[in-house]
Amino acid sequence: MPPPPDATAADHPLTLGLYEVVSKIAEGGMGTVYKCRDPRSGQLVAVKVISPGTTRNPVVLQRFEREFTSARVLEHPNVVRAIEFCGTGPNPFLVMEFVDGESIGQMVERAGAMPEDEAVRLIGQVCDGLQRAHKQGLIHRDVKPDNVLVTKGGVAKLTDMGLVKDVEGDTNLTKTGRGLGTPHYMAPEQFRNAKGVDARGDVYSLGATLYCMVTGVVPFNNSNPLDCWMKKIRNEFPPPRELNAAVSERVDWAIRRAMSADPANRPSSCREFYEDLTGQSRGSGPVKGTAATAAPADNWYLVYRDENNQPTTVKGTTASIRDALKNYLLGDPNQILVGRSKTGQFVPLGSAPEFRDLVVAPAALGPDGKPSGTPRRPVPVPTPRPSSDPTVDPAEASGRNPKPPAPPSGRYVPAPARVPKRDAPPAEDQAAKKIDWTTFALMMLVALLSSVVGYLLLTR
């Protein structure tokens, strides 16, 4: 005689609705995930069951259903697919695609830091899935290594959409002033107001996730939520290259830019973050596509102003132009325009991923709290007409624009004559910017107590 529905074995039920339970995958405070089999098709699925103690909380139930509706509309190979939601009965559950593999968190815990190429490949796939979510008006708000599953075939899939926010029709599931997510990976602005987080909050979490992948170290580890937030708003974390010398300068720069405290200093999209990592422009296709597309010829045209302040056009490859910029042959990078053709559209140098790292420098802070660099963002300027001079090679431009002395930092610093002089701010303005730490401590204490009370109410 077959066992009655939902009969319980030693450590798990035998069935969940129509699904036969094979084994328990994971268990947490919000629920348990089981590996199950659909008897109708023989397909393996993952079933997430909400904890009995939280079924009485309508907000938690709404978030559980939100996870299903969010994943269902995201038909993407790098997002775990949602199959079915059952909100009736004593134990509501969600049926999802079963991923035969492990999470990135488990991979790092087992083997330590990943090779950079593999880490960038996987995070690029996550960028693809998250970019699709953002295009559909969904913000994940809990991107972290444990929420990225990797199949045995090496395909990354984003999961756990329970904290997803619908930009267009957000309900009151998240109250203003309440932070949701995982402290070590979420953006600093999310601590204070998870409801107001946009795509750049997910970009921060992507950067923090990649930080863990290439260093084997959890960012802001050994910090409580308050200390974690304080370090985040001061950009106070060791650069990845200090923890792992094998990390390239470009990936180090891209991670630090993505983890900037100010959202305005981060990449504006997941696609831009991936372009920062690779130094290559990319279209809307997947990271590893099967259809080969013809790459544009490696020719660039740059418009800069010579020593007589006249627009001059130079032509070269990516490598030759980067060398010219690093050797200060073309003047202030913020004033240089770039395009693919001599008569085509010219855009600020920082708009091209191939050169963006030479213009935008994130301001990562060391343990002493002093900035190791100053952010420089591309300054849009009117596109000048290319001069009538014949196009020259960047290496020949040194005679047109003498090289200024190399600064100690190794990055270009504009000549003194071009740097606008700024008056020192009045002392009273500086005093007005100081934080009232007593008030801040009281606010954080109230927030902490509110979180504890909320947790106790949820677990009653």
Image (spheres, rainbow, N blue to C red):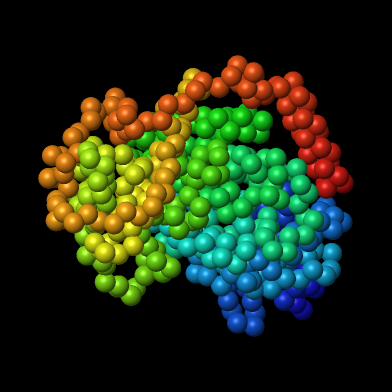
Q: Position of residue 167 (x, y in %)?
A: 67, 60
Give the residue drawn at x 49%, y 31%: 237
Give the residue drawn at x 77%, y 30%: 443
Q: Position of residue 221 (x, y in %)?
A: 55, 33
Q: Is residue 124 visible?
A: yes
Q: Image height check: is 175 above or below 343?
A: above
Q: Image height check: is 106 above or below 435?
A: below
Quarter containing the N terminus: bottom right
Q: Nearer the viewer, residue 260 or 374?
A: 374
Q: Position of residue 171 (x, y in %)?
A: 77, 59
Image quadrant assignment for residue 177: top right
Image quadrant assignment for residue 404: top left
Q: Image height check: is 459 above or below 429?
A: below
Q: Is residue 148 left or right of residue 84?
A: left
Q: Is residue 25 left or right of residue 116?
A: right
Q: Nearer the viewer, residue 289 or 426?
A: 426
Q: Is residue 418 left or right of residue 19?
A: left
Q: Position of residue 293 (x, y in %)?
A: 30, 72
